[in-house]
Image (cartoon, helix red, strand yellow):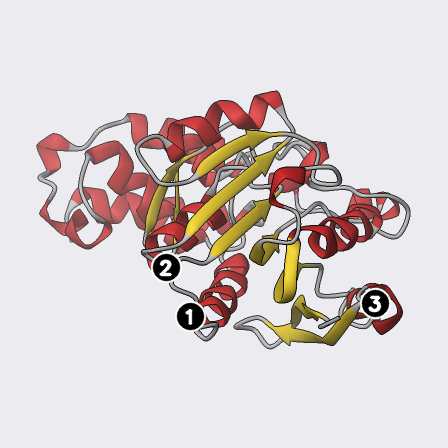
Amino acid sequence: MNLLLAEVAQATQRLADAGVPSPRHDAEELAAFVHGVKRGELHSVKDVDFDARYWEAVARREAREPLQHITGRAFFRYLELQVGPGVFTPRPETESVVGWAIDAVRAMDVVEPLIVDLCTGSGAIALAMAQEVPRSRVYAVELSDDALVWTRKNVEGSRVVLSQGDARTALPELNGQVDLVVSNPPYIPLTEWEYVAPEARDYDPELALFSGEDGLDLIRGIERTAHRLLRPGGVVVVEHADTQGGQVPWVFTEQRGWADAADHPDLNNRPRFATARKAMP
């Protein structure tokens, strides 16, 4: 075992003791970042090339600063995104949301599908949709000035059209034309603040986390926006907390003009996102 791998083993134990959920992964990712190699190449770093700044990075993660803030990057599906203070860090569970949305768009048999991502944050969902549905037209909406600093960096050079605005009033010029609306909105109840992981509670912007007493305030607003934007037969996909599986589909009722409202599990088989189809007239 070379010096770096020995240090990674020690770092893993330190991170585990600090309550970091994925200590081995994070210790290796930090080592790879500091030494400019891939995780699978850590064994190739010579002992004389060990960089003591590794322990500075480990100390920051030990204090529960998000891994992605330390490295300045987040991986999402096939993307590498720039992230940092002021923008919500994309999570792995959202990848299953996007996977379902991509499959839904492909099944529509529309030549150039029109897609809207509300509360885009880093741009992760919008960019993944644009990348994996090559002829799609993708619009992304974000309200926060701080988040938009990062969104603009990530969407630069892409086909994503970025708009600053409120998800509840966004893009009236697209009313009735959109094939799919997708969103990972804030959905944590204000009463749950103390139970939120430190990485999110202390570093993600509150605007991206909390949404009223039951966490569903903005989802209710997105329901109206989606109904306004979608063409008849168009689909909405909204992420929610795994404790809200029994609630969110009921936001998309037949009385409000929806059909086929349903909940779907993430890769851990926990309720993660709701979908509905705009009813035909």
Q: Is residue 121 left or right of residue 249?
A: left
Give residue 230's position: percent from left, percent from top. Answer: 64, 57
User: Is residue 182 depicted above or below 194 in this figure?
Assistant: below
Vertical order, 12 against 253 (above or below): above
The mark that comes first in sequence, 1 or 2, is 1
Kindly report which numbered mark, 3 or 2, lies closer to the viewer in this rendering.
2
Amino acid under disc 3: Gln
Amino acid under label 2?
Val
Q: Residues within 10 Å of mark 1 (few under 14, many from 20)?
A: some
The reply to whether discs 1 and 2 touch (Cβ–Cβ < 8 Å) is yes
Q: Position of residue 95 (x, y in %)?
A: 48, 60
Q: Residue at x 49, y 50 (%)?
A: 125
Instruction: Decide which of 23, 94 is in the foreground and name it.
Output: 94
Left or right relative to 160: residue 52: left
- Residue nearest the observer in this picture, 11 or 23: 23
* Mark number displayed over residue 133: 2
The local secondary structure at tag 2 comes to: loop
Residue that appears at 53% across and 40% down:
140
Q: CA distance from mark 1 to mark 3?
A: 28 Å
Helix or strand or loop: what does disc 1 sit on?
A: helix
Which picture quadrant has residue 146? top right
User: Is residue 171 in view?
Assistant: no
Verify CB contact (< 8 Å) between mark 3 and mark 2: no
Nearer-N-terminus badge (1/3): 1
Percent of width and height locating residue 217: 84, 47
* Residue matched to label 1: 106
Q: Callout 3 environment at 10 Å: few (<14), some (14 to 19), or many (20+)?
A: some
The residue pinned by badge 3 equals: 247
